Amino acid sequence: MKVIKVKDYQELSEVASKIFIDLIKEKPDCNLGLATGSSPLGLYEKLIESYKKGEISFKNVKTYNLDEYCELPRNHEQSYFSFMHRNLFDHVDVSPENINIPNSEVEDLEKECERYNNVLNANKIDLQLLGIGANGHIGFNEPGTSFTSQTSIIELAEKTREDNKRFFNSIDEVPKYAITMGIKNILDAKAIVLIANGKNKADAINKLINGEVTEDFPASALKNHPNVTVIIDEEAASLL
């Protein structure tokens, strides 16, 4: 596991985006695993800037999102479908048919998990982007999730719902379930980049870097992967 410490969020976004930009230049038809939340926003801004400068094109890039809330329609402003379009897809030349996000609007969510899992198994991700939850979750794989898990419906931990409450009017509006890539799906990626910023991520980062490998801390599974880069700002690195 390679750890890169940077000064602040701006530098974190620049360093992380360069890894993605370099891959898109080298392999224009690459498969990217994408994440939501506040951590990737700066990275996505950098990708949009690079596209607008004519440095990269998303025309042949395929994207695969980590997860999606179950109880929200796709047009809800807090759905990850809406998030990705608002913060990246609507600003670049990605082809709609190359965008892959779990669909929570279907009637049979178990079948949707099976469908999405088959898509992931048929399309090896070249570079997977991750954030990390305060309790060590990656995707929505909460503590106790098996490292062999594949795409499934997850009941969100109360800590995760509390952390995401800031995006909603109240905790009552935060979904209780989500579809997520499993830990095995994440580890199947050829390369992984995890980004974390802020003091609220310092404890999780310390456990990731210095703790043991255990299913009680899902992100620790990344220690079993041969090509992981962790990029953290000074605040997130403050307990190391």
Image (cartoon, rainbow, N blue to C red):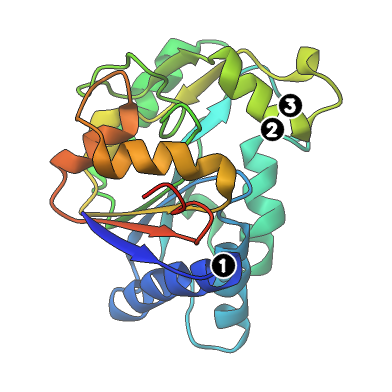
Q: CA distance from mark 2 to mark 3?
A: 19 Å
Residue at point 40%, 21% (across, down): 113
How many numbered marks appear? 3
Q: Say left or right for 146 vs 224.
A: right
Label 2 vs label 3, nearer the camera: 3
Which residue does the numbered mark 1 point to in the structure image? 8
Q: Quadrant of the N terminus?
A: bottom left
Which residue does the numbered mark 2 point to in the structure image? 74
Q: Check disc 2 and give the amino acid type.
A: Arg
Residues marked 2 and 3 touching at CB (< 8 Å): no
Label 1 vs label 2, nearer the camera: 1
Q: Position of residue 3 (x, y in %)?
A: 29, 60
SS class, disc 3: helix
Is residue 14 visible in the rendered image? The answer is yes
Splitting the image into 4 quarters, where does residue 66 fall?
top left
Q: CA distance from mark 1 to mark 2?
A: 33 Å
SS class, disc 1: loop
Label drawn at residue 165 = 3
Residue ranking furthest to the front: 239
Neighbor class of circle 1 (other Cα within 10 Å; few <14, some 14-19, many 20+) is some
Q: Earlier in the sequence, mark 1 or mark 3?
A: 1
The residue nearer to you, when weighing 9 against 118, is: 9
Label drawn at residue 148 = none
Q: CA distance from mark 1 to mark 3?
A: 25 Å
Q: Position of residue 156 (x, y in %)?
A: 54, 16
Q: Position of residue 93 (x, y in %)?
A: 58, 70
Residue at point 32%, 34% (across, down): 219
SS class, disc 2: loop
Residue at point 47%, 81% (across, down): 56
Residues marked 1 and 2 touching at CB (< 8 Å): no
Q: Earlier in the sequence, mark 1 or mark 2?
A: 1
